[in-house]
Amino acid sequence: MSTTTPSEQPRASVLVINSGSSSIKYQLVSPEDGEAIASGIVERIGDTVGAVKHVAHGTTTKRELPVPDHAEGLRIVLGLFDELGPDLESAHVVAVGHRVVQGGALFDGPALVTPEVERDIEDLAPLAPLHNPANLTGIRVAQTLLPDVPHVVVFDTAFFRHLPEAAATYAIDEDVATRYRVRRYGAHGTSHQYVSQQVAQILGRPLEDLNQIVLHLGNGASASAVRGGVAVETSMGLTPLEGLVMGTRSGDVDPAILIHLYRNAGMSIDELDDLLNRRSGVKGLSGVSDFRALHDLVAQGEAGARRALDVYLHRLRKYIGAYHAVLGRLDVITFTAGIGENDDIVRAGALAGLEALGIEVDLARNEGRKSEPTVISPDGAKVTVLVVPTNEELAIARQALEVVGA
């Protein structure tokens, strides 16, 4: 008979995989304490030479080698765990969690991977043609290489699955919308859900009592309004193109711009897609998408960069004001993701002029990058303003653990 007590049982871990069109990001996570035990990325899959980075035991290992496809990429990842650690068997991996971008109207939470779920992900590919096929490839390859543990999918859209109909519905012909599944799905939902839940814990207040605005500001950017832990609005729509100005994406534009450019510039659908997704946003206005470079150009007096920053901040303020109106009462605004956590200029600029709404920033508290949850509003402010680092991998790991019941 074993004498091992429950406290001596090895802690469970989850291997989180984010399979993109030409990359695989991965992280071995302890859901219990949130530790990232190991992490890495395989890039340039399908190119002549790929790049691999594995971080474990405080050491970063980088290699360049051929990675012809995702199957070989995941074999390389598992080989790195065997060679450099930690050993996955000793790590007590109880599930593999997969990020999937589009869950459509079918999924409002995580799901155990089954043949039916795989078919659903494939069927939803027209709504996320750059993402769902790559996500599905990673799932299938990982199941082949790791057949003895359950696999769980976590959808970016799930948190927004039950938006109010008035928020989710586009005012176009209903038959067309129904036939082609046109509605607001949102994105970054895993991050918005995780951060809004963290805010309640940080403030020591019941989640059900809080009205929140969450600003996920990275190269892709989105806003959400969350009432009592439930999303009631979000800025991204049918695709991740709608909403805020982003690094290379336009965000909101008059749809007739596309018709105008088609008729008068002779631009094709592919050219319009490229324009709005890759040659717009901050990059389209300033020539750069990295905000550090943008701030340098602003400091040098470059007019295009100044205008790009002004447009970016104006759109943010507009959404904050709109979501304040949607919620009726606002308790918390939270910044997260790469820009939200690290760019004090953007944080201060986004909230400038909103004092009449009870929204203020303490400039000393706001200064610098934030690697820990930080209140940046003054004491006694009507609206608490926070910076909370997001952790989508941990959120995926915890949701996967719930599904498998480990």
Image (spheres, rainbow, N blue to C red):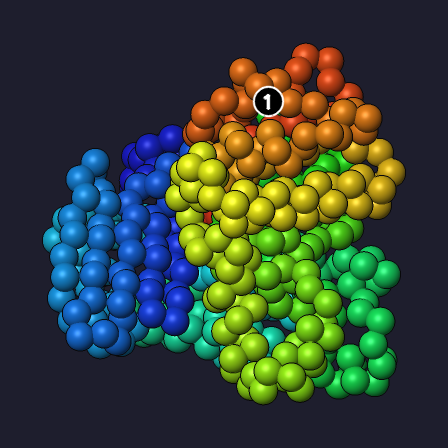
Residue positioned 28% across, 52% down in the render: 40
* Dot 1: element: loop
Which one is nearer the viewer's eye here, 55 or 91? 55
Q: Quadrant of residue 261?
A: bottom right
Residue position marked by numbered label 1 in the rendering: 376
Q: Is residue 332 above or below residue 179?
A: above
Residue positioned 13% across, 66% down in the render: 65
Residue 12 visible? The answer is no
Which one is nearer the viewer's eye here, 394 or 300? 300
Residue positioned 54% across, 75% down in the render: 273
- Taking 27 as reference, is 198 left or right? right
Q: Position of residue 307 (x, y in %)?
A: 58, 47
Residue farthest to the top? 379
Q: Quadrant of residue 239?
A: bottom right
Q: Is residue 362 above or below residue 14?
A: above
On-image quarter of the N terminus: top left
Q: Position of residue 88 (x, y in %)?
A: 25, 52
- Taking 145 as reference, is 12 left or right? right
Q: Is residue 229 above or below residue 372?
A: below
